[in-house]
Image (cartoon, rainbow, N blue to C red):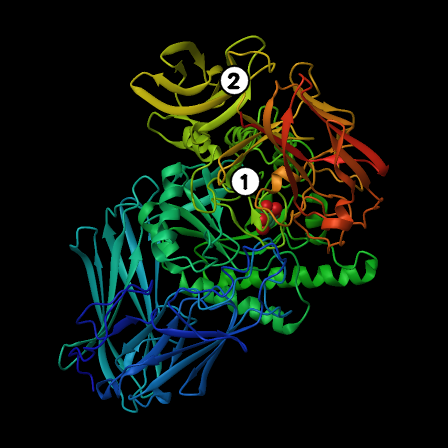
Amino acid sequence: MLKAKSLFLLLIAATTGLTGFAQDGGRKIISLNDQWEFNKENGPVERVDLPHTWNDKDVLDDVPGYYRGLGIYKRKLKLDESVKGKAVFLVFNGVAQEAEVLVNGRSAAKHIGSYTRFIVPISAYLNYKDDVIEVRANNRFNEDIPPLTADFTFFGGLYRNVSLLIANPVHFSQKDHGSSGVFITTPQVSALTANVQVKSTIDNTLAVVQKVQVTTTIFDAKGSVVNKQTSAVTINKNENKTVIQDIKSVQKPELWSPENPYLYRVVTQIIDVKTKAVIDQVANPLGFRWFRFDAEQGFFLNDKPLKIIGASRHQDYENRGNATPDALQIRDIELLKAMGGNFLRVAHYPHDPQILEACDRLGILASVEIPVVNTITETEAFTSNCLNMQTEMIRQHFNHPSVIIWAYMNEILLRLKFSNDKARQQVYFTHVRELAQKLDSLTRKLDPSRYTLLVNHGAWDIYNKVGLTKIPMIVGWNLYSGWYSGIPEDFGKFLDRHHKELPNTPFMVTEYGADADPRIRSFSPIRFDKSVEYGLKFNQVYLNAMLSRPFVAGGIAWNLADFNSETREETMPHINNKGLLMIGRQPKDTYFLYQAYLLGQPYLKITSAAWQDRTGIADSAALTSTQPVQIATNLKSAELFVNGKSLGIKDAVDHLIDWQVPFTNGKNQLRVVSGDQNDQAEIYFQLQPFTFNDNRVPFKNINILLGAKRFYIDEKEHQVWIPGQTYKPGAWGWIGGEPYKGTNNRITYGSDKNILGTGNDPVYQTQQVNIKQFKFDVPDGEYDLALHFAELVGGETKEALAYNLDNNHKKEVEEQRVFDVSINGTAFLPKLNLAADFGYTTAVKKTTRITVQNGKGISIDFKPIAGKPVLNAIQLRKIY
Ligand code: GCB
């Protein structure tokens, strides 16, 4: 019965993010990621491998929403007779979000919640011949399961690793909330000596008493045994027994920290007393560290002050939804480390186990939270699901030295329910407070060694009134002054307010960020323009404010990378652009800014080097166009060379240096130097003539945005769009009208609506309203002209979305808009009615070839018939 011989020849072991095992360790873990059949309810069957989501494609289209329903996965299990008598389990690292597991058609288990592991014992259902597993996963809306609403997409599916665990009948408990069954703490720890406590629970599934030994061995990073303890244990039949081992006085433990993430390995074994065979074995990480939060002085790790600076992360990836393979998950933590970050907020739900393992290895501190976001449901089922998720999270991730905080609520009063019924609202607030209190108490009980955290948005009064700032050990504030409201400089005032009014409560800035679409650049950045440049300014102000205030324990950027959020529209529909990295993890300029702020070694980087194709209008009568170039550095000063010529040495201000660079037509070599550091970039510049009669600057083509002060780089078609200008004789520009300013007093930049029928939304999201004319004073020749329009006003009133910049969503006052467009006096688009002819917020592109003759240039006239004519963008290309 307790034979340790390897019996599972057909099966190949693979990584699972589960605790380790050894070949002779009595258990086998085999990946079941391959060979699944999948179908949506009533849909066609396809062959898939895991990780898999059924929403990876339908979040990419222009159609709002995504499939939220049932998905059915089936797979054969090839087990032979030799497995009979073993304890066989299916281990699911995460299924979104309700799951039922059937074995040979019989229901073996159900699980609620997308983000935690569950383990299903299946021995009782197996025939060891032609076993079939079926997983019925459902990501429908269920009011009893958090998250109810949130600014991220609730992908469905078997989106994390699945494995088979074959254990002996006596094994470390698989019944404890998906945990390893072994829990490690360091009740006493200092640089001189430490005590380790190992609590293991063993299941005896046999109908006979078992006498075993439990042996715990601590190995150092080199593999040498540091300490070992063996306990004799007798376990009654069908008993579940907990063994506590106190390993005293580990001398001079090497401490774990971000600079030196020294990991020990704790291997716990169940050993057959008679045969000395290892019946079961698990390994867990161990880091020796201690920490505290202080309301006055911030955070301390191993008694040394440490400013927490890091980022939050969502688990999805470009084109893959949440089905992100292990290697890409781990790479995120490497990118965070390479940025100089020391903290990961695992938001807004527990991530794949690989994430915290990587944090342990790389020295990234972490907080983990359950997905109770925005609102709660006042039912017992909701409460019990929350408590269960919190328990699963803590039990499953308990042994990670990187984890220092358990959190449980995010911006729970973001949308105030029952605003029209104050009495009812008070009842709701009471329920919220009670749920917070329950989660906090549970957390302190399950893990007294870590801190609890509750995260609020910047509405100071309401969180204090409801009492949510009194419950957790640390308060988190998600602050967006200078984005959703106010100016970046308000941020510091908020920090000071907390310090003054809650002087005994440690706090962190758990979120801050501004959208930055890397395709958008601006030389006069303003709020909501989505430019990378605004993002840089915003982050500078925030970093300075936090770094200069010791009482701020830390700041956590929102977000490490852009992520899917189906309900968002804006310049990149369905994506939240607050990442320091893009959704495919390419760095944005803001990522480089963080490196400049945080890295210890000398750092020098041309931030916009990735913007390789630029265009701009020649400085009057010159053969250059002057545009800014920025570098990020932690050095005092640097010198910039353009095509070998020095532009002088400049000092860094808040880790950035700006130069005004006179770009010439064609290739421009940039080289920045400081001491022995340097960085280079090659920028291809297309010079636009200041006036068309300047033969030294031949005109090729120009792409112009109207109503915009931003540049837009269409990386797919390699087109750079520049902001429009008022008409200048001899050159080009618009006459008449004003930039679109939104409706209902929305404070947006242009429109924040998804423009249908294009991936180039920014081309259509701004416009000149009431335009009279657009002129190009080009010389005679053949030209291709393209006019771009979109009706930005009207259309369906969407449900108010908490996060879209426009959360006003009043029905817009539509006015009839009909106008004639003529080119050089000839009708081109008579009686154009964008809404009626093409639909609201739909990209309309009209092109034509024009012969310019008799020195007349091009003049496009807009004549209103009803309402005000508009033009969103215009392109001109000279053919010959
Ligand atoms: C928040 C939320 C987060 C959003 C973020 C944003 O406060 O906690 O889920 O994604 O703001 O970008 O608006």
Residue in the image at 52% along x and 17% along y = 698
Position of residue 834 in the picture relative to residue 182 (left or right):
right
Q: Residue at x 73, y 55 (%)?
A: 798
Please tell me which residue is depicted at 43% across the width and 10% down the height of the picture: 647
343 sits to left or right of 834: left
Question: Which residue is the site of mark 2?
Answer: 698
User: What kind of residue is marked 1?
Assistant: Ala
Q: Secondary structure at mark 1?
A: loop
Tag 2: residue type?
A: Pro
Residue 715 locus on image (x, y percent):
49, 38
Q: Residues within 10 Å of mark 1 (few under 14, many from 20)?
A: many
Q: Determine which quarter of the picture holds residue 143.
A: bottom right
Image side of residue 784 versus residue 817, left or right: left
x%, y% of residue 150?
61, 56
Label placed on residue 295: 1
Image quarter (top left, top right, bottom left or bottom right) of the N terminus: bottom left
**Residue 633 in view (yes/no):** no
Mark 1–mark 2 distance (CA, rounded to whole Å): 64 Å
